Amino acid sequence: MSNNYIDPFQQAHIERLVAQFGSPLVIVDCERVRSQYRSHAKALPGVELHYALKPLPHPAVVRAVLDCGGSLDLATTGEVQLAQRLGADPRHSIHTHPIKRDKDIRNALAGGVRVFVADNPDEVRKFRRYRNEAELLLRVSFRSPGVVSDLSRKFGCDPESALELARLAASLGIPLRGFSFHVGSQALDARKHVEAIEVCARLLAAARREKLGKLDTLDIGGGFPIAYGDAVPDIGRFCAPIRKALKLLPKRIRVIAEPGRYIAGPAAIAVSAVMGRAQRGGFWWYYLDDGVYGSYSGQLYDHARYPIRALRQGPLHASVLAGPTCDSIDVIAEDVRLPKLKEGDLVVGSAMGAYTWATASEFNFFPKPTVVSVNETPGDTGTVLEV
Ligand SMILES: *Cc1c(COP(=O)(O)O)cnc(C)c1O
């Protein structure tokens, strides 16, 4: 950590940043991005970390990951272009969207990306014409009804058909690098990761026996959890069974993980201001300039509940926090204990880096919050970048 580090989540800095940049604000602490990256790397030694841009595709976050020696997980042409603009080495990036248009493949190839993901025969066939430039990982599905967002319902082939798909790729002359999976986001424990690693270890060995390709890569996806209200195991403990399972892999396998939430989530807070208030049904209702159509959109899309506090001190009352739009669904919290707030008072949501600003809309013409990054370089007290 540099000597010039300031903690932008402290009250004085929150107030300074809102005075400078207005509200609503999302404050990203690049030092926290780097420290999340380092903790993750320490928890999975020897595993290449590819930050998945989707939870917070912001240049300051991407640069902080690259600064730490991290790589990128890209899924769309927009993400490929952002990585290109920031000078990321495309040979270290992977493209992990299992379903792509031909132009998405071409854009990624033009940007220098080589490794792609496919999960079905039609998608594999799309790579026949690119077999001299592109290499494939085959995504395998492991259902996780327990996780908050089960991504294996929408993507991935059954483990039983993965070898058949590998044979198809090999028969078309498409270089096959290995298998990938994503057990779903915010996993509560590592059991699914372990099960998936065990199955993929067998698939790699079987595909190698049939000489279906180089088969030197396993991509274990994301899903690494962060604490919102309730405690979750720290990353070292969470990954302990994963470290053990990875020892079962055949020799000389390159292992990749694609953390998104874990890197970005704890690295940002969302700050909004009270626009007005009213007493309704015995409660104070406070209307903020950010809500579920803004950075609190994660409450709907990501099923998250963020710890929320006001900067003002005082006796607490059961209160309601609402967003700014005219829609009745735009209520952030009905059950929150807050001091009596006034117009202009600031309210802070924590752990709001992942799947928050990224999924915000401009419904009712309320603009998305401004993102200000701090500590990108030593002495950086707050910068608003073009996104
Ligand atoms: C969204 C996504 C990730 C990131 O997942 P987290 O649970 O946020 O770590 C990684 N890989 C792929 C393919 C994704 O779609």
Image (tube, rainbow, N blue to C red):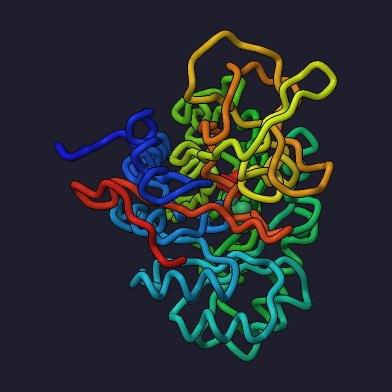
Residue 310: x %, y % from top left: 53, 25
Q: For residue 170, which quarter of the picture?
A: bottom right
Identified at 31% across, 33% down, the residue is 7
Q: Is residue 126 left or right of residue 11?
A: right
Residue sitting at x 46%, y 58% = 58
Q: Position of residue 72 (x, y in %)?
A: 45, 61
**Could you tell me which quadrant the N terminus lies in?**
top left
Q: Residue furthest left?
A: 3
Horizontal side, residue 201 vs residue 29: left or right: right
Give the vertical position of 111 relative to 165 (above or below): below
Q: Residue at x 81, y 16 (%)?
A: 282
In the image, residue 305 lies at what x, y percent? 67, 31
Residue 321, quarter of the rendered image: top right
Q: How many marks?
A: 0
Q: Is residue 320 visible?
A: yes
Classify 276 as above or below 123: above
Residue 222 in picture, x, y percent from top left: 57, 47
